[in-house]
Amino acid sequence: MSAVPSASPATSTATRSGARVVVTRTDDVIDGAEPVVAVMVDDGEILSFTPATAAHLSGMLVRAATAEIAVKIRVTNSYPDRSFEHTYDVVAPAPRDDEDVYDWCYDHLWQYTGEGPQYANVPAAYEVEILSAPTPFTHLIGLKIDSYG
């Protein structure tokens, strides 16, 4: 038994280079089969994906196209006699999918640790935790890095 035919929704957009891209979803499938998301570009080439694969690809494309992200972080600076906790809204370069997120965090968020010159020579434990991040970077929420020195 097959599904009842229906009109497939389509979206068309232009890329920065001026090329046209058309995206459609076909729900008219045989029972038990998945719908198909198809992408057609100017040269007529068509790429077809399951909805799950298309959603994953969409996230990858958005992350690749994003230059910077706004994140909320909690910084904890612990010294022998006192601890300080701060919450900051910061903007950092967006991590690439192939980049180690811990390295990215040390490279771009670590700079917010410390309490200034009065604690420069005091042993301490530092922690940075990401409290919020935009879609599709929500996988960063809860990421923690720490160091002692």
Image (spheres, rainbow, N blue to C red):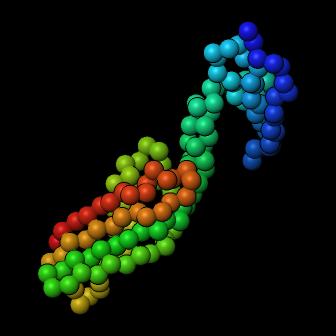
Residue located at (85% from left, 27% from top): 7
Residue located at (64% from left, 16% from top): 33
Task: Evaluate whether residue 92 shows in this view.
Answer: no
x and y percentages locating residue 61 in the rendered image: 60, 43
Say how many tags the image has.
0
x and y percentages locating residue 37 in the rendered image: 70, 28
Instruction: Choose top left, top right, bottom left or bottom right for residue 123.
Output: bottom left
Q: Horizontal placement of 102 versus 16: left or right? A: left
Instruction: Choose top left, top right, bottom left or bottom right for residue 58.
Output: top right
Which residue sits furthest bottom?
A: 118
Task: Evaluate whether residue 74 shows in this view.
Answer: yes
Residue located at (17% from left, 72% from top): 149
Q: Horizontal placement of 88 versus 22: left or right? A: left
Residue located at (42% from left, 69% from top): 73
Q: Nearer the viewer, residue 65 or 139?
A: 139
x and y percentages locating residue 119 in the rendered image: 22, 86
Position above or below: 127 against 9: below
Which residue sits furthest front?
A: 1
Q: Nearer the viewer, residue 65 or 143?
A: 143
Q: Horizontal placement of 72 versus 127: left or right? A: right
x and y percentages locating residue 47 in the rendered image: 68, 25
Q: Horizontal placement of 61 versus 19: left or right? A: left
Position above or below: 8 against 147: above
Q: Nearer the viewer, residue 38 or 44?
A: 38
Q: Quadrant of the N terminus?
A: top right
Position above or below: 28 against 20: above
Which residue sits furthest right?
A: 7
